Amino acid sequence: MNGLMHFLEHKLAPVGQRIGNQRHLKAVRDGFMMAMPLVLVGSFFLLLISWPDEALNFSVTGLLEKLGLLGILTTMNQSTMAIISLIAVFGIAYRLAESYETDAPSAGVIALSSFILMAPRFSTTVFNEKGEEITQVFGGAIPFGSLNANALFVAITVGLVSAEIYRLFIQKGITIKMPGNVPDVVGKSFAALLPALTTLIFWACVLKGLEAAGVQGGLGAVLGVIVGQPMRLIAGSIGGMFIVVLVNSLFWFCGVNGGQVLNAFVDPVWLQMTEENQAAAAVGDALPNIITLPFKDLFVFIGGGGATIGLALCLILFSKSQTYKTLGRLSFIPSFFNINTAILFSFPTVLNPIMMIPFVLTPAVNAVITYVAMASGLVPLTTGVVLPWTMPPIIGGFLATGGSWQGAVLQVVLIAVSFAIYYPFFKVADNRNVELEKEERV
């Protein structure tokens, strides 16, 4: 056990810290956060327009239609979730340029323009006089499918590359320099001209190269094959989810934020799958994906990293140690909002050999139970509604599954499972702490 703890503390933890602090991964992670307000707001509108009739005694959508609100609410939903990639590309380039201490807004705008350049347009097939097919592209019309979560890998690539080109020009001094008495905002605008021109020419060459190669779907199709499909196979399967959860929990156990290490890799995939469910729910089709972002946030990691909500119950209900009783009173309410910092570092669970097994095991078990419950039809799938990760259980499960009581009951079951797994390990720790407190009083 000592050898394992030494490996986790001195080998795995430093690796996690380096990955979590890598500037490009941080830029991707922080760039996505700029789009999250739109995701959350758009999910609220989706909740209204796709509320299942069986959840109430009357049709919510029918009522909204009678009131003349259904159309505008649908448009509001499309105007938020449907432009996630558009916001993400700006945010990613902004954060990366910021990390280099260059002008972040200029880098973001250049990346945004490059993303629009690379976005596939509407096209139609017509026939000439000889009956030959001719595909016409309407240059000014960009479908929502080119701007939503389906284009996240394009947004990541364009955002990172554009910011790197901009940074290279600025740091090498390859810019148009204005006199010192010119206002700073004007100087920055002129300094961005050469990197902007170069970046747009670069992406135009990429676009024409793909067209010349006969690639249908542009850069998104290429990245989908190279990156999207492998990541979807990993993050979209129960086996892949199980591995991701285990690695996430191991990093958290070492005191490293597992989400910071892994989210830049898997969240884009889960967000795509969430939006696919949202699009299906909006038109009344069958939901295609079991694993989504709410699946992870609201069911797997219920109570925070390590799914410690069961441990919080143990602390407040069964602690004999005075220290643990106090910790239980302080940590119980935050744990129901998935905030478990006190438990992680005050109990502690971090690098605590007694708690390693339940800390790693509980969220993995939650993932399997949730997947089986949804795959078997016992619990409806998440409808694409993205709720804050701080949403308390029962309410969160009810809303995430489209107003289903089964979703709320599943969260109650997961809390009970968390409690059952943590309890025997908690008792060992509690008894040890009681003995220590007795020794201190003596």
Image: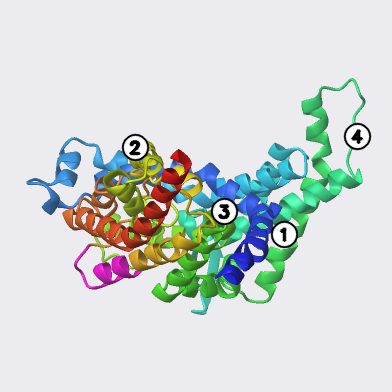
* Residue that carries the numbered disc 3 in the rendered image: 255
Residue 113 in percent (x, y) is at 66, 47
Q: Which residue is mark 2?
A: 329
Query: Over which residues does the magenta segment extend?
Result: 368-379
Q: Which residue is mark 4?
A: 177
User: How much space separates mark 2 and mark 4, taking CA atoms?
Assistant: 61 Å
Work out whether residue 60 or residue 28 is closer to the camera in this orientation and state it: 28
**Mark sitting earlier along the chain (1/2):** 1
Q: Could you tell me which quadrant the C terminus lies in?
A: top left
Please provide percent x and percent y for residue 91: 61, 45
- Residue corresponding to mark 1: 204
Q: Is residue 299 left or right of residue 212?
A: left
Few, some or many residues within 10 Å of mark 2 (<14, 14–19, 20+) = some
Q: Could you say which quadrant of the image residue 76 lies in?
A: top left
Which mark is first along the chain, 3 or 4? 4
Sequence order check, earlier mark of 2 and 4:
4
Q: Residues within 10 Å of mark 1 (few under 14, many from 20)?
A: some
Q: What secondary structure is found at the residue carrying circle 2?
A: helix
SS category of the residue bearing label 1 = helix
The residues tagged by marks 2 and 3 sit, at their Cα atoms, a distance apart of 23 Å
Seen in the picture, residue 22 relative to 61 is either above or below; the reply is: below
Q: Mark 1 and mark 2: span between their CA atoms? A: 60 Å
Q: Earlier in the sequence, mark 3 or mark 1?
A: 1
Disc tally is 4
Q: In the image, is residue 335 above or below residue 367?
A: above
Q: Main secondary structure of the magenta part?
A: helix
